[in-house]
Image: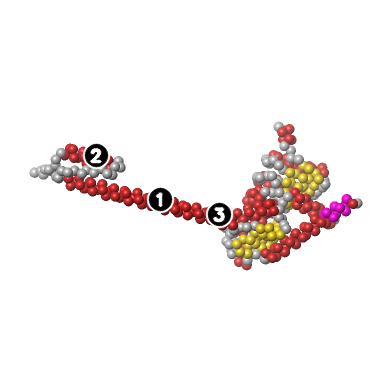
Amino acid sequence: MNTAMHDKRIPIIKIKNFLIVSIQVDMHDRLALQLQSQILEEIEKTGAKGVLIDISVLEMVDSFIGRMLSGMASMASIMDAAVVIVGMQPAVAITLVELGLEMPGVDTALNMEKGMEMLERRLRNQEFEL
Amino acid sequence: MSETYNIQNVKERINRIEDVLASVAAGDLDARIESEIEDDLSGIEAAIDLLIDDLTDELRQRAKMQKELEDKLSKIQEQQKTIMQQQEDLLELSSPVSKVWDNILILPVIGTLDSQRTQIMMENLLQKIVATGCTIAILDITGVPTVDTQVANHLLKTVTSARLLGAECIISGISPAIAQTIVHLGINLSAIRTKATLQDAMIYAMKQNKRSEEVKLQIQRAGYDETEE
Protein backbone atom coordinates (compact mmCIF):
# COMPACT_ATOMS: atom_id res chain seq x y z
CA MET A 1 0.00 0.00 0.00
CA ASN A 2 2.89 2.26 0.80
CA THR A 3 4.42 1.72 -2.62
CA ALA A 4 1.07 2.35 -4.28
CA MET A 5 0.93 5.72 -2.59
CA HIS A 6 4.43 6.53 -3.68
CA ASP A 7 3.48 5.69 -7.27
CA LYS A 8 0.85 8.39 -7.15
CA ARG A 9 3.32 11.06 -6.10
CA ILE A 10 2.81 14.36 -7.88
CA PRO A 11 6.06 15.46 -9.53
CA ILE A 12 7.66 18.71 -8.39
CA ILE A 13 9.89 20.29 -11.01
CA LYS A 14 12.52 22.88 -10.20
CA ILE A 15 13.29 25.53 -12.81
CA LYS A 16 15.74 28.28 -11.87
CA ASN A 17 14.45 29.66 -8.59
CA PHE A 18 10.97 28.23 -8.91
CA LEU A 19 9.16 25.00 -8.22
CA ILE A 20 6.48 23.90 -10.66
CA VAL A 21 3.76 21.55 -9.53
CA SER A 22 1.18 20.40 -12.01
CA ILE A 23 -1.71 18.58 -10.43
CA GLN A 24 -3.12 16.19 -13.02
CA VAL A 25 -4.98 13.65 -10.92
CA ASP A 26 -8.09 13.99 -8.83
CA MET A 27 -7.02 15.13 -5.40
CA HIS A 28 -8.14 13.23 -2.38
CA ASP A 29 -7.45 14.44 1.11
CA ARG A 30 -4.45 12.25 1.88
CA LEU A 31 -2.79 13.07 -1.45
CA ALA A 32 -3.34 16.76 -0.75
CA LEU A 33 -1.69 16.59 2.65
CA GLN A 34 1.16 14.54 1.22
CA LEU A 35 1.64 17.10 -1.55
CA GLN A 36 1.66 19.92 0.97
CA SER A 37 4.50 18.48 3.02
CA GLN A 38 6.30 17.36 -0.13
CA ILE A 39 6.31 20.91 -1.50
CA LEU A 40 7.44 22.41 1.79
CA GLU A 41 10.29 19.92 2.02
CA GLU A 42 11.29 20.71 -1.53
CA ILE A 43 11.31 24.44 -0.75
CA GLU A 44 13.68 23.78 2.14
CA LYS A 45 15.90 21.50 0.08
CA THR A 46 16.22 23.71 -3.01
CA GLY A 47 15.82 27.14 -1.47
CA ALA A 48 13.22 27.99 -4.09
CA LYS A 49 11.75 31.47 -3.97
CA GLY A 50 8.51 30.71 -5.69
CA VAL A 51 6.04 27.86 -6.22
CA LEU A 52 3.69 27.62 -9.19
CA ILE A 53 0.79 25.23 -8.68
CA ASP A 54 -1.09 24.45 -11.88
CA ILE A 55 -4.63 23.27 -11.24
CA SER A 56 -5.99 23.82 -14.75
CA VAL A 57 -7.10 20.21 -15.14
CA LEU A 58 -8.80 20.02 -11.75
CA GLU A 59 -12.51 20.17 -12.35
CA MET A 60 -13.49 19.89 -8.75
CA VAL A 61 -11.94 21.44 -5.68
CA ASP A 62 -13.64 20.83 -2.36
CA SER A 63 -13.30 22.89 0.78
CA PHE A 64 -10.51 20.70 2.11
CA ILE A 65 -8.32 21.12 -0.98
CA GLY A 66 -9.16 24.83 -1.03
CA ARG A 67 -8.07 25.20 2.56
CA MET A 68 -4.96 23.14 1.86
CA LEU A 69 -4.01 25.46 -1.02
CA SER A 70 -4.50 28.67 0.94
CA GLY A 71 -2.74 27.14 3.95
CA MET A 72 0.15 26.18 1.76
CA ALA A 73 0.49 29.77 0.54
CA SER A 74 0.83 31.03 4.11
CA MET A 75 3.25 28.26 5.08
CA ALA A 76 5.43 28.87 2.03
CA SER A 77 5.46 32.61 2.61
CA ILE A 78 6.81 32.02 6.14
CA MET A 79 9.55 30.02 4.46
CA ASP A 80 10.22 32.97 2.13
CA ALA A 81 8.64 31.47 -0.97
CA ALA A 82 5.67 32.91 -2.84
CA VAL A 83 2.90 30.61 -4.04
CA VAL A 84 0.96 31.34 -7.22
CA ILE A 85 -2.04 29.24 -8.12
CA VAL A 86 -2.34 28.93 -11.87
CA GLY A 87 -5.17 28.20 -14.28
CA MET A 88 -8.15 27.77 -12.02
CA GLN A 89 -11.33 26.77 -13.88
CA PRO A 90 -14.29 29.19 -13.68
CA ALA A 91 -16.51 26.52 -12.13
CA VAL A 92 -13.89 25.86 -9.45
CA ALA A 93 -13.59 29.58 -8.70
CA ILE A 94 -17.35 29.91 -8.32
CA THR A 95 -17.49 26.86 -6.04
CA LEU A 96 -14.72 28.19 -3.81
CA VAL A 97 -16.36 31.61 -3.52
CA GLU A 98 -19.73 30.01 -2.76
CA LEU A 99 -18.04 27.93 -0.07
CA GLY A 100 -16.72 31.17 1.41
CA LEU A 101 -13.11 30.23 0.62
CA GLU A 102 -11.99 33.45 -0.98
CA MET A 103 -8.31 32.63 -0.38
CA PRO A 104 -7.15 36.06 0.74
CA GLY A 105 -3.41 36.47 0.37
CA VAL A 106 -3.10 33.80 -2.30
CA ASP A 107 -1.83 35.00 -5.66
CA THR A 108 -3.42 33.62 -8.77
CA ALA A 109 -2.61 33.77 -12.47
CA LEU A 110 -4.50 32.84 -15.60
CA ASN A 111 -1.78 30.59 -16.98
CA MET A 112 1.71 29.31 -16.27
CA GLU A 113 3.37 32.05 -18.32
CA LYS A 114 1.61 34.85 -16.46
CA GLY A 115 2.28 33.15 -13.14
CA MET A 116 5.97 32.95 -13.94
CA GLU A 117 6.03 36.64 -14.89
CA MET A 118 4.31 37.49 -11.64
CA LEU A 119 6.92 35.62 -9.60
CA GLU A 120 9.80 37.17 -11.53
CA ARG A 121 8.35 40.63 -10.97
CA ARG A 122 8.03 39.93 -7.28
CA LEU A 123 11.59 38.63 -6.95
CA ARG A 124 12.82 41.71 -8.76
CA ASN A 125 10.87 44.03 -6.47
CA GLN A 126 12.39 42.25 -3.49
CA GLU A 127 15.86 42.78 -4.93
CA PHE A 128 15.16 46.48 -5.32
CA GLU A 129 14.02 46.75 -1.74
CA LEU A 130 17.28 45.32 -0.47
CA MET B 1 -110.98 1.13 3.15
CA SER B 2 -108.00 0.71 0.93
CA GLU B 3 -107.32 2.29 -2.47
CA THR B 4 -106.40 -0.02 -5.27
CA TYR B 5 -104.03 0.84 -8.10
CA ASN B 6 -104.79 -0.02 -11.67
CA ILE B 7 -101.53 -1.50 -12.87
CA GLN B 8 -101.03 -4.17 -15.47
CA ASN B 9 -98.15 -6.64 -15.51
CA VAL B 10 -96.70 -5.13 -12.32
CA LYS B 11 -93.85 -7.55 -11.94
CA GLU B 12 -92.73 -7.34 -15.54
CA ARG B 13 -92.82 -3.51 -15.65
CA ILE B 14 -91.01 -2.98 -12.37
CA ASN B 15 -88.32 -5.32 -13.67
CA ARG B 16 -88.14 -3.25 -16.85
CA ILE B 17 -87.69 -0.03 -14.79
CA GLU B 18 -84.94 -1.66 -12.74
CA ASP B 19 -83.18 -2.89 -15.87
CA VAL B 20 -83.22 0.55 -17.48
CA LEU B 21 -81.95 2.29 -14.33
CA ALA B 22 -79.21 -0.29 -14.01
CA SER B 23 -78.04 0.17 -17.59
CA VAL B 24 -78.09 3.99 -17.21
CA ALA B 25 -76.00 3.64 -14.08
CA ALA B 26 -73.61 1.45 -16.08
CA GLY B 27 -73.23 4.23 -18.62
CA ASP B 28 -75.70 3.36 -21.38
CA LEU B 29 -77.46 6.73 -21.80
CA ASP B 30 -79.64 5.59 -24.72
CA ALA B 31 -81.68 3.22 -22.53
CA ARG B 32 -85.35 4.30 -22.08
CA ILE B 33 -88.39 2.56 -20.60
CA GLU B 34 -90.76 3.65 -23.42
CA SER B 35 -93.79 1.78 -22.12
CA GLU B 36 -96.96 1.91 -24.29
CA ILE B 37 -99.41 0.95 -21.56
CA GLU B 38 -101.52 3.77 -20.03
CA ASP B 39 -102.17 3.31 -16.32
CA ASP B 40 -101.08 4.50 -12.86
CA LEU B 41 -97.41 3.47 -13.34
CA SER B 42 -96.94 5.15 -16.73
CA GLY B 43 -96.52 8.61 -15.05
CA ILE B 44 -93.50 7.37 -13.13
CA GLU B 45 -92.11 5.67 -16.22
CA ALA B 46 -92.38 8.87 -18.24
CA ALA B 47 -90.76 10.88 -15.41
CA ILE B 48 -87.82 8.48 -15.26
CA ASP B 49 -87.39 8.72 -19.04
CA LEU B 50 -87.36 12.54 -18.77
CA LEU B 51 -84.81 12.42 -15.97
CA ILE B 52 -82.55 10.21 -18.07
CA ASP B 53 -82.90 12.71 -20.96
CA ASP B 54 -81.85 15.59 -18.68
CA LEU B 55 -78.95 13.62 -17.29
CA THR B 56 -77.75 12.79 -20.80
CA ASP B 57 -77.83 16.47 -21.78
CA GLU B 58 -75.92 17.49 -18.66
CA LEU B 59 -73.23 14.90 -19.19
CA ARG B 60 -72.75 15.88 -22.83
CA GLN B 61 -72.41 19.52 -21.89
CA ARG B 62 -69.90 18.69 -19.22
CA ALA B 63 -67.79 16.66 -21.62
CA LYS B 64 -67.82 19.59 -24.05
CA MET B 65 -66.71 22.05 -21.37
CA GLN B 66 -63.98 19.74 -20.20
CA LYS B 67 -62.63 19.52 -23.71
CA GLU B 68 -62.65 23.31 -24.04
CA LEU B 69 -60.82 23.68 -20.73
CA GLU B 70 -58.21 21.17 -21.78
CA ASP B 71 -57.67 23.06 -25.03
CA LYS B 72 -57.22 26.29 -23.13
CA LEU B 73 -54.83 24.67 -20.68
CA SER B 74 -52.61 23.31 -23.44
CA LYS B 75 -52.61 26.74 -25.08
CA ILE B 76 -51.56 28.39 -21.82
CA GLN B 77 -48.83 25.81 -21.30
CA GLU B 78 -47.53 26.54 -24.78
CA GLN B 79 -47.46 30.26 -24.03
CA GLN B 80 -45.67 29.59 -20.76
CA LYS B 81 -43.03 27.64 -22.66
CA THR B 82 -42.52 30.52 -25.08
CA ILE B 83 -42.17 32.98 -22.22
CA MET B 84 -39.59 30.79 -20.49
CA GLN B 85 -37.65 30.42 -23.72
CA GLN B 86 -37.69 34.18 -24.26
CA GLN B 87 -36.58 34.81 -20.71
CA GLU B 88 -33.65 32.47 -21.20
CA ASP B 89 -32.73 34.20 -24.45
CA LEU B 90 -32.97 37.56 -22.74
CA LEU B 91 -30.69 36.41 -19.95
CA GLU B 92 -28.10 35.25 -22.43
CA LEU B 93 -28.36 38.33 -24.57
CA SER B 94 -28.26 40.72 -21.67
CA SER B 95 -24.71 40.01 -20.55
CA PRO B 96 -22.32 40.36 -23.47
CA VAL B 97 -18.64 40.28 -22.60
CA SER B 98 -16.42 41.98 -25.16
CA LYS B 99 -12.70 42.36 -25.52
CA VAL B 100 -11.98 46.04 -26.16
CA TRP B 101 -8.22 46.21 -25.95
CA ASP B 102 -5.20 44.01 -25.38
CA ASN B 103 -5.79 42.27 -22.10
CA ILE B 104 -9.03 44.20 -21.33
CA LEU B 105 -12.58 42.84 -21.20
CA ILE B 106 -15.71 44.92 -20.69
CA LEU B 107 -19.04 43.71 -19.36
CA PRO B 108 -21.66 46.46 -19.54
CA VAL B 109 -24.66 45.71 -17.34
CA ILE B 110 -27.98 47.33 -18.21
CA GLY B 111 -31.25 46.95 -16.36
CA THR B 112 -32.19 45.50 -13.01
CA LEU B 113 -29.99 42.77 -11.66
CA ASP B 114 -31.45 39.70 -10.04
CA SER B 115 -29.67 36.68 -8.63
CA GLN B 116 -30.21 34.49 -11.67
CA ARG B 117 -28.98 37.13 -14.08
CA THR B 118 -25.90 37.94 -11.99
CA GLN B 119 -25.13 34.24 -11.82
CA ILE B 120 -25.19 33.88 -15.62
CA MET B 121 -23.24 37.11 -15.97
CA MET B 122 -20.59 35.82 -13.61
CA GLU B 123 -20.24 32.52 -15.46
CA ASN B 124 -20.01 34.28 -18.83
CA LEU B 125 -17.39 36.66 -17.58
CA LEU B 126 -15.22 33.96 -16.00
CA GLN B 127 -15.41 31.77 -19.08
CA LYS B 128 -14.47 34.67 -21.30
CA ILE B 129 -11.53 35.55 -19.03
CA VAL B 130 -10.19 32.02 -19.40
CA ALA B 131 -10.89 31.87 -23.13
CA THR B 132 -9.21 35.19 -23.99
CA GLY B 133 -6.52 35.19 -21.32
CA CYS B 134 -7.32 38.82 -20.45
CA THR B 135 -6.21 39.81 -16.97
CA ILE B 136 -8.34 42.92 -16.55
CA ALA B 137 -12.14 42.91 -16.61
CA ILE B 138 -14.28 46.03 -16.27
CA LEU B 139 -17.77 45.60 -14.89
CA ASP B 140 -19.71 48.71 -15.90
CA ILE B 141 -22.92 49.15 -13.93
CA THR B 142 -23.88 52.61 -15.22
CA GLY B 143 -27.13 51.17 -16.56
CA VAL B 144 -28.18 49.58 -13.29
CA PRO B 145 -30.80 51.64 -11.42
CA THR B 146 -30.59 49.96 -8.01
CA VAL B 147 -28.89 47.13 -6.20
CA ASP B 148 -29.91 45.22 -3.10
CA THR B 149 -27.85 43.20 -0.63
CA GLN B 150 -28.05 40.06 -2.69
CA VAL B 151 -26.96 41.70 -5.90
CA ALA B 152 -24.12 43.53 -4.16
CA ASN B 153 -23.08 40.19 -2.73
CA HIS B 154 -23.13 38.65 -6.21
CA LEU B 155 -20.99 41.47 -7.56
CA LEU B 156 -18.52 40.84 -4.76
CA LYS B 157 -18.52 37.15 -5.59
CA THR B 158 -17.88 37.89 -9.26
CA VAL B 159 -14.90 40.05 -8.41
CA THR B 160 -13.52 37.46 -5.98
CA SER B 161 -13.91 34.59 -8.44
CA ALA B 162 -12.18 36.63 -11.14
CA ARG B 163 -9.33 37.20 -8.73
CA LEU B 164 -9.10 33.47 -8.05
CA LEU B 165 -8.67 32.91 -11.79
CA GLY B 166 -5.87 35.45 -11.80
CA ALA B 167 -7.69 38.43 -13.29
CA GLU B 168 -8.43 41.83 -11.82
CA CYS B 169 -12.03 43.01 -11.90
CA ILE B 170 -12.84 46.74 -11.80
CA ILE B 171 -16.35 48.05 -11.16
CA SER B 172 -17.21 51.34 -12.81
CA GLY B 173 -20.19 53.64 -13.05
CA ILE B 174 -21.59 53.34 -9.55
CA SER B 175 -24.44 55.87 -9.36
CA PRO B 176 -25.05 58.05 -6.28
CA ALA B 177 -28.15 56.05 -5.43
CA ILE B 178 -26.22 52.78 -5.53
CA ALA B 179 -23.35 54.22 -3.52
CA GLN B 180 -25.83 55.32 -0.85
CA THR B 181 -27.56 51.95 -0.75
CA ILE B 182 -24.31 50.06 -0.53
CA VAL B 183 -23.04 52.13 2.38
CA HIS B 184 -26.40 52.06 4.15
CA LEU B 185 -26.53 48.28 3.78
CA GLY B 186 -23.13 48.11 5.41
CA ILE B 187 -21.46 46.33 2.51
CA ASN B 188 -17.73 46.83 2.40
CA LEU B 189 -16.52 47.33 -1.15
CA SER B 190 -13.09 48.60 -0.14
CA ALA B 191 -11.44 45.37 -1.30
CA ILE B 192 -12.71 46.08 -4.82
CA ARG B 193 -11.26 48.63 -7.18
CA THR B 194 -14.04 51.00 -8.19
CA LYS B 195 -13.82 53.79 -10.76
CA ALA B 196 -16.23 56.65 -11.41
CA THR B 197 -16.78 56.14 -15.12
CA LEU B 198 -16.01 53.60 -17.77
CA GLN B 199 -13.45 56.04 -19.11
CA ASP B 200 -11.58 56.15 -15.80
CA ALA B 201 -11.65 52.38 -15.64
CA MET B 202 -10.25 52.12 -19.18
CA ILE B 203 -7.46 54.58 -18.36
CA TYR B 204 -6.59 52.62 -15.23
CA ALA B 205 -6.64 49.33 -17.12
CA MET B 206 -4.41 50.63 -19.88
CA LYS B 207 -1.94 52.08 -17.38
CA GLN B 208 -1.87 48.72 -15.67
CA ASN B 209 -1.18 47.09 -19.03
CA LYS B 210 1.65 49.46 -19.75
CA ARG B 211 3.19 48.91 -16.35
CA SER B 212 3.21 45.14 -16.70
CA GLU B 213 4.72 45.47 -20.20
CA GLU B 214 7.49 47.66 -18.83
CA VAL B 215 8.25 45.28 -16.00
CA LYS B 216 8.34 42.42 -18.48
CA LEU B 217 10.86 44.29 -20.63
CA GLN B 218 12.98 45.15 -17.62
CA ILE B 219 13.07 41.54 -16.51
CA GLN B 220 14.01 40.43 -20.02
CA ARG B 221 16.78 43.00 -20.21
CA ALA B 222 18.06 42.00 -16.78
CA GLY B 223 18.08 38.38 -17.96
CA TYR B 224 20.21 39.28 -21.00
CA ASP B 225 22.61 41.32 -18.85
CA GLU B 226 23.14 38.36 -16.57
CA THR B 227 23.90 36.03 -19.45
CA GLU B 228 26.29 38.51 -21.04
CA GLU B 229 28.24 38.82 -17.86
Q: Residue furthest right?
A: B229
Q: Measure the alpha-carbon separation of dots 2 and 3.
A: 61 Å
Above or below for B159 versus B197: above
Marks 2 & 3 on one chain: yes
In the image shown, does B20 or A17 lie closer to the viewer?
A: B20
Q: Residues within 10 Å of mark 2 (few under 14, many from 20)?
A: some
According to the image, label 1 marks what residue? Answer: B70
- Specify start and end residues of the magenta stretch as a single range: B219-227
Residue lying at 72% horizontally and 43% vertically, measured from the top left:
A23
Whether residue A29 appears in this view of the structure is no
| Secondary structure state at the residue bearing disc 1 | helix
Discs 1, 2 touching: Cβ within 8 Å: no
Residue at x 71%, y 42% (from the top left corner): A24
Amino acid at circle 2: Asp
Q: Position of residue B216 (x, y in %)?
A: 80, 55
Q: Main secondary structure of the magenta part?
A: helix
> In this view, which residue lies farthest toward the bottom?
B176
Chain ID of residue with mark 1: B
Badge 3: how crowded within 10 Å, few (<14), some, or many (20+)? few
Give x and y (percent) for residue B4.
Answer: 11, 43
SS type, badge 3: helix
| Nearest to N terminus: mark 2 or mark 3 | 2
Screen quadrant of the N terminus of chain B: top left
- Amino acid at the residue labelled 1: Glu
